[in-house]
Image (cartoon, rainbow, N blue to C red):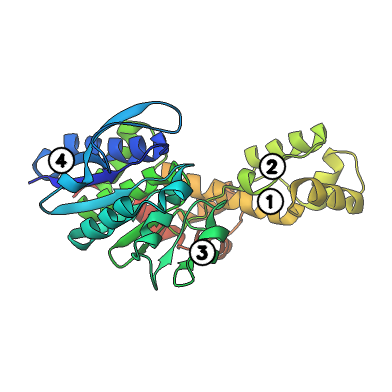
Amino acid sequence: MRRRVLMIVFPGFQLLDLAGPSDVFATAALLAPEDGYQVEVAAVRAGPVPSGNGIAVTARALGEVTGPVDTLMVVGGMSVPEQLGDRELVGAVARLAAGARRVASVCNGAFLLAEAGLLDHRRATTHWLAAGELDARYECVEVDADPLYIEDGNVWTSAGVLSGVDLALALVARDHGHALARDVARGLVVYLHRPGGQSQFSTPMRAMTPRSEPLRELQAYIDANPAADLSVPALAGRVGMSERHFSRVFTAQTGLSPGRYVERSRAEAARRLLELTAHPLDRVARESGLGTPETLYRVFRRHWRISPGDHRRRFRSKEK
């Protein structure tokens, strides 16, 4: 029996918030036809609903939705602030959530869940640009702007836009196991299923792009050569600066000290090795520049909030 997924949209919604998770569920249905998903789209009024980029999707009327819903998912979009005063939309979200097995939001769709009272006394996330507003507007919501997605009871919230794919993969993994989620990710040629505790930002995203071309080239060198000598003296020498001047300029232009940037870059290198190879942890530690399994464990826990072994098992679980 297929699980019914109801996606709620509104004029000006973010198309990727709908398309990404919908394709995850549709691909899972192809791979697991006996227990897959049936995706439906609903809005306040039936008919074409224009997204923020002008592409319209056909939706059924929320008032006509009856019967049990397995997963209720509210998308986001630039027009969300305008939708918060739509009592019919907010009321439908609250009504349908009451009968759903679980409820989820993508990006700033979390505001609609909050407006419906579904995030009261729960931990939630949203796009990092909107997190401060969510926190200020809804005092009963514990907002955490860092994770890709958060599960609190039967309510799931995700960060910006494409993190909706990560959320949908997590839901598939919860229903069918990580092996199917991994196969869906491979089929869609998207990033392998990331844990919700992982930060919304990769190391390059956390750091500003340096104005100086030599520093931009050095940044690329660091990311491409994690096992190299990336000490401050070595890096300063590559750009022809004194150590003190290099540290000051690098920090000013990237927002991160050289040491912090190198550690984060090496943590990401270790993450990729754990996901894409079967290397033992000592080799992962060496090739990522972290040196020893003990350092790997300590740094990985600090940056990804999960142990290296647990991360690998999540991504590379073997078929039984």
Camera sees residue 274: no
In front of the other: label 2 or label 4? 4
Q: Residues within 10 Å of mark 3 (few under 14, many from 20)?
A: few
- The amino acid pointed to by label 4 is Ala
In the picture provided, is 156 more to the left or to the right than 160? left
Camera sees residue 115: yes
Q: Are marks 1 and 2 in contact (CB under 8 Å)?
A: yes
Mark-to-mark CA distance, 1 and 3: 37 Å
In front of the other: label 1 or label 3? 3
In the picture provided, is 227 more to the left or to the right than 4? right
For label 2, the residue is: 222
Q: Are marks 1 and 3 in contact (CB under 8 Å)?
A: no
Mark-to-mark CA distance, 1 and 2: 7 Å
For label 3, the residue is: 137
Give me the residue at 65% from left, 55% from top: 263
Residue 131 in the image: state x and y as whole percent. Answer: 53, 58
Callout 4 secondary element: loop
Give me the residue at 40% from left, 39% from top: 13
- The amino acid pointed to by label 1 is Val
